[in-house]
């Protein structure tokens, strides 16, 4: 009969041929559970609370995207060696300088913003093998301009190495200025 297929033909068509092979077994999804100690940050496996986060290229911690202080504190705690102390110090200075600062971790970097979410982000941190990079998203508008240039015309950096003398007054002045400028939307 035209337009009809026999039951045998249908069953044969549904079975994989030797060339197609058989379907691969599907791996079960990892469960994500909230860790109250991380205040909103997540971990990749239940029962992995004692596991340390993966360190990416240059020692940058791999922390799940999240908003609020918890993910930022998880990132800072996971920063390797002396960098964790630098992260705590920078975070405390930013909090003291910009009351009500917003925080998040995106792209494995803590971000800081002033005002509501519509105002964007003014600063980020990132670990590298030999230094911690502080990015001021509107850094070219700061006075004086932070020392390290970027390929993006508005962005300027401060690199903090292990034994560097850190000018806290200059850093807080930059944070104050940056927090008053329009932020970067990400």
Image (tube, rainbow, N blue to C red):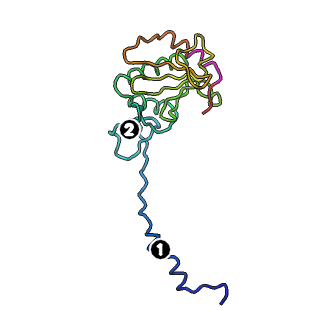
Outermost residue on the left side: it is 50
Q: Reading the chain from its start, which is encountered first: label 2 or label 1?
A: 1
The residue located at (35%, 43%) in the rendering is 48
Residue at the image position 48 percent from the left and 76 percent from the top: 15
Q: Which residues are magenta?
A: 175-182
Q: Tag 1's secondary structure?
A: loop
Q: Does 8 appear above or below 133?
A: below
Choose between 53 and 155: the one closer to the eye.
155
- Relative placement, left or right, of 76 versus 175 is left
Quadrant location of the N terminus in the rendered image? bottom right
Specify whether residue 34 is painted magenta: no
Q: Is residue 46 above or below residue 130?
A: below
Residue at disc 2, secondary structure: loop
Where residue 5 sits, quadrant-wise, is bottom right
Q: Position of residue 111 (x, y in %)?
A: 53, 28
Name of the residue lying farthest toward the right: 2
Q: Which residue is mark 2?
A: 54
Q: Are marks 2 and 1 in contact (CB under 8 Å)?
A: no
Front: mark 2 or 1: 1
Image quarter for residue 123?
A: top right
Q: Disc 2 and disc 1: Cα gap in Å?
A: 40 Å
Q: Number of marks in the image?
A: 2
Does the magenta stretch mainly form a helix, a strand or a loop?
helix
**Measured along the vertical axis of the image, is residue 160 above or below residue 27?**
above
User: Percent x, y for residue 73?
Assistant: 43, 29
Q: Residue 58 location, x and y as percent? A: 40, 31
Mark 1 neighbour class, 10 Å CA radius: few under 14, some 14 to 19, many 20 or more: few
Q: Which residue is outermost to the bottom?
A: 1
Q: Which residue is mark 1?
A: 16
- Of the 4 image quadrants, the one containing the C terminus is top right
């Amino acid at each position: 009969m035209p337009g009809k297929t026999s039951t045998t033909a249908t069953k044969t068509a549904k079975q994989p041929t030797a060339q197609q092979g058989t379907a691969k077994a599907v791996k079960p999804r990892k469960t994500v559970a909230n860790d109250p100690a991380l205040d909103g940050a997540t971990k990749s496996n239940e029962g992995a609370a004692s596991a340390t986060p993966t360190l990416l290229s240059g020692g940058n911690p791999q922390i799940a995207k999240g908003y609020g202080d918890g993910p930022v504190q998880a990132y800072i705690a996971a920063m390797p060696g002396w960098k964790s102390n630098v992260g705590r110090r920078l975070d405390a200075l930013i909090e003291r300088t910009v009351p009500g600062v917003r925080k998040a971790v995106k792209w494995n970097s803590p971000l800081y913003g002033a005002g509501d979410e519509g105002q964007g982000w003014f600063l980020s941190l990132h670990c590298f093998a030999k230094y911690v990079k502080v990015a001021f998203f509107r850094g070219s508008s700061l006075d004086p301009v932070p020392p390290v240039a970027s390929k993006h015309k508005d962005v300027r950096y401060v690199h903090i190495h292990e034994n560097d003398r850190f000018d806290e007054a200059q850093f807080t002045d930059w944070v104050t200025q940056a927090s008053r400028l329009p932020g970067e939307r990400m």
